[in-house]
Amino acid sequence: MIENIKRIIKENHPTYDELVSLFDVEKKVINEYLLLLEQDGLIEKVKNRYYLTSELNLIPAVIISIKEKFAFANVSEDEDLYISINNLKNAFLDDKVLLKKISSFGEKDEYEVVKVTKRARSILVGEVVVFGSTKVLKVDKIARPDFLFLINSDLQIKNHQIVEAKIKKISSSSSVVEVINILGHKNDIGMDVTRIILFNNAPLEFNEDVINEVKNIPSEVKKNDYKNREDYRDHLIVTIDGDDAKDFDDAVEVSKVDDIYYVGVHIADVSYYVKENSPLDKEALNRATSLYVQDRVVPMLPFELSNGICSLNPHVDRLVTSCLFSIDEQGHILTTHICKGVINSKYRLTYNYVNKFLNEERYNKQEYNDLETMLINLSEVSNIIRKQREKKGGLNLSSTELSFHLDEQGTPISIEKRKQDIGEKLIEDLMIKANEIVASSIEKMKLDMVFRIHEQPKAKKLESFQRISLSKGYPCNVDPLSCTSLDLANYLNSVKEEDRVVLSSLLLRCLAKAKYSISNKHHFGLASKSYTHFTSPIRRYPDLMVHRLIDKYIVHNNKQSSEEDKVSLALKCQLCSTRERRALNIERTVESLLCCKYMANHLGEEYLSTIVSFSNQGMFVEIENGLQGFVPFDSISGDYYIFDEEVYRAYGVRKGKEFSLGKKVKVICCNVDLQKYQITFNIIKGDNHGRYKNRRKQ
C-alpha cells in the first residue's frame, strides 16, 4: 500500500482529500502511512499538495555526527553527506532532516538543512553551567558549538549538576529548556554511564502507570493459567546461562531414541502477562530491548516480571511457548510442534558448569546420570545443527567482546576478552534452530510475520574488502554483485588461522546490519531462508510480537489479518530496529568509556599490539586484552607516513618502512581523552616490527 501511495503522489500530486478518496480503508491507516513517509523525508506538502521530495531535489537524511566546523548526515548504509556547521542550522544529532545540495568542490559536495522532519529528542541531558545570572545547559556533540540551551526553570539548580531538561522552544540559534529532574553532580559514581544512557534518549525509570500495572500481575502461576497448555513439568528441563544472569527466558531439553533426537526449546510466555496496548506493553515497545552495560541492566520489562513471574527460575511452575522438534544425525528436521505449555525447570546451570563437564569431566566417567546424559545429547544436537548451518554457508563472524571487572567506584581494574565455549555455542545453536522453525512455520501459512533479516552486502564494500584481502595474500574470488554466504564461508576457510581473526573482523564491517521487517529478505549471515527472533521475549520486543502471532495463528487458529495490522507490524519493526541500534551505540560508548578509564591508570605502560585497521591519519591497534587504540602517523618519528588504501598499508615516504594489517608492533600508551573516548598509543622507538621495502620498485 505504501508503494501505491508514493506512486499516486508522483503521478498526480494529490491533496489529502483526493488521496484518501482513492483507498477503501479507514483514514487513520492512510494517516499512519503519510506520517511515516513525512518523518522519513520521502514526501513533502507544497501548497496543500503532496510531492515526493526527490521531485523537489530534497534528500532525506539523519544527522549522525556533529563536529566543531562541520557535520555529517547519513542517507544510506554507505553514504554520508557533508554539511558545514553554519548550514546545520537548528538541527540536532539524530534528527531526521531534508537536505539540499548547495555547492560542489571537486569530488566533495556540500549540503544544507532545509527542514527537520522529525526531532529525535524532546528531553536533553547535560551539565548546568552558571554565568552570573544566566544558566546554560552544556550538552556536548548534540548541536552546533555556538547553539545555546538557555535554562528557564523554577528548580534550585547548581553549577556542575547533571540534569534532565525539556525542550520548550527552538529558534535559529538557541533553545529554551526547562529542568525537570536533577540527577546529581557530574562526579557522582556511575554518573558518566547514566549520562551516556540518557544522552541517547533511553529511559532509565518506569512511569507510574507501568508500576501500578505491575502491582496487579501475580508473582506465581495460578490454577486457571494451566488451561489449554501442554504439561511438560515432569520433563528434565534446564536453563543454561551466565553466572550473573537473573532473567532466564529460555530452557531446553533433549532425549535420544535410536538415532533420533527429540528437542524442546521452551521460552517464557511473556505475552500472557503483558497485554497488548497496556501501559506496560507501550513502555516495552518504547524501550524495545533491555540494555546491558557493565555496571547495570536497564530492563525492557520491570524486574518483577523479567526476574520474577516471567523468568524460568528452577523448581517453580512457569508458563512457556514451546518449540519442539525431532532431528536426525544428518541434520534433517523430521517433525515440529509449536504450542503453549507449562514447565518446571529442574536445574539452573551455568555456562562454566556445562563447559567444565563437556570439556573435561565427561571423559573421566564410565557412567552418566540423567542430567549428564542430556548435556551430552545437547552437545551432539548442537554439533549437528552447527555443521548443517556451516554446510549451507553460515558465517562464523564475531567481533571481540570485552569483559570488565569494576571496583566499588565503577573503575575497571581488569579487562579481558569474553570467550565463547561449548556451552554458549550449544544454547546459540538451539535458539537459532528454534527461530528458523517458528519463522518458516508461520511463513508457510502466508500470514503477516516479523522476520529478522540480514541482506546481501553491498558490492562496493565487498570490492574494498577484496583489495584488502589480496594485500594479505588471500584472493577473495567472489562476485561482489551476487556472492552468497557460502562463497564467503569457503573463502574464510582458505585463510590461515593467524590471519583469520583480523580479516573476519574487517569482513564483518562489510556486511549489512540485521534488522526487523515484515518482508522476508532472508538472513545472509546465517544462510537462513526464513528467520525470526522468538527466543528472548523478556529482553526483546520483536520476540514478544512473534509470541502474539503464534498465539493468534497457531493457538487460536485466527488467520485474519487486516491492512491496519500490517501497518502496525511494519511500524513496530522499524521502531525496534532503531531502538536496537540505539542500545548497541550505548553499549559501545560505555565500553569505550571504561577502556579509557582503565588506560588512564596505565599511561606510560608498554604493550605488544596487532594492527587491525587504518585511516588516513593513522592506524588502529589492539593489545592482548582486546582493548583498541589509535596510533597517529605524525607521532611516528623518522619519516612521513601515508596510508595506501589500494594495498591497505602505510609506508614511510623517505625510508619505505611499511606497516601492514595484522602486523605486531610494540606501543606505549601516551594519552587518554575521557571526553572523546579516545586512547592514543605511540610506537616505541626502535621497534623493528614494521617492514622496510623499496617503494620505487613497486
Image (cartoon, grey):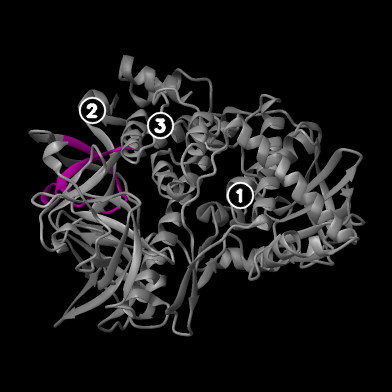
Cα separation between marks 3 and 2: 54 Å
Q: Is residue 405 visible?
A: yes
> Who is closer to the viewer here, 449 or 563?
449
Check if mark 3's residue and mark 2's residue have beta carbons within 8 Å.
no
What's drawn in magenta, residue-wise?
78-100
Disc 3 crowd rating (10 Å Cα; few below 14, some 14-19, many 20+) is many
Q: Which residue is located at x 47 percent, y 32 percent?
A: 455
Q: Residue at x 41, y 44 (%)?
A: 503
Magenta stretch holds residue 101: no
Looking at the image, tell me whether mark 3 or mark 2 is earlier in sequence order: 2
Q: Which label lies toward us, 3 or 1? A: 3
User: Callout 1, which amino acid?
Assistant: Asn
Q: Is residue 11 above or below residue 186?
A: above
| Amino acid on which disc 2 is placed | Lys
Q: Is residue 316 left or right of residue 654?
A: right
At mark 1, the secondary structure is loop
Tell me if label 3 and label 1 are in contact, CB under 8 Å.
no
Secondary structure of the residue carrying numbered label 3: loop
Q: Earlier in the sequence, mark 3 or mark 1?
A: 1
* Residue 347 appears left or right of 402: right
Residue 135: mark in rendering: none
Name the front one of labels 3 and 2.
Answer: 3
- Determine the residue located farthest toward the top in the rendered image: 11
Residue 570 pos. (x, y %): 52, 36
Residue 695, position in %: x, y?
14, 42
Look at mark 3 in the image and give the residue it sits on: 476
Residue that badge 1 annotates: 277
Return the residue at label 2.
47
Q: Is residue 580 left or right of residue 19?
A: right
Q: Is residue 687 left or right of residue 623?
A: left
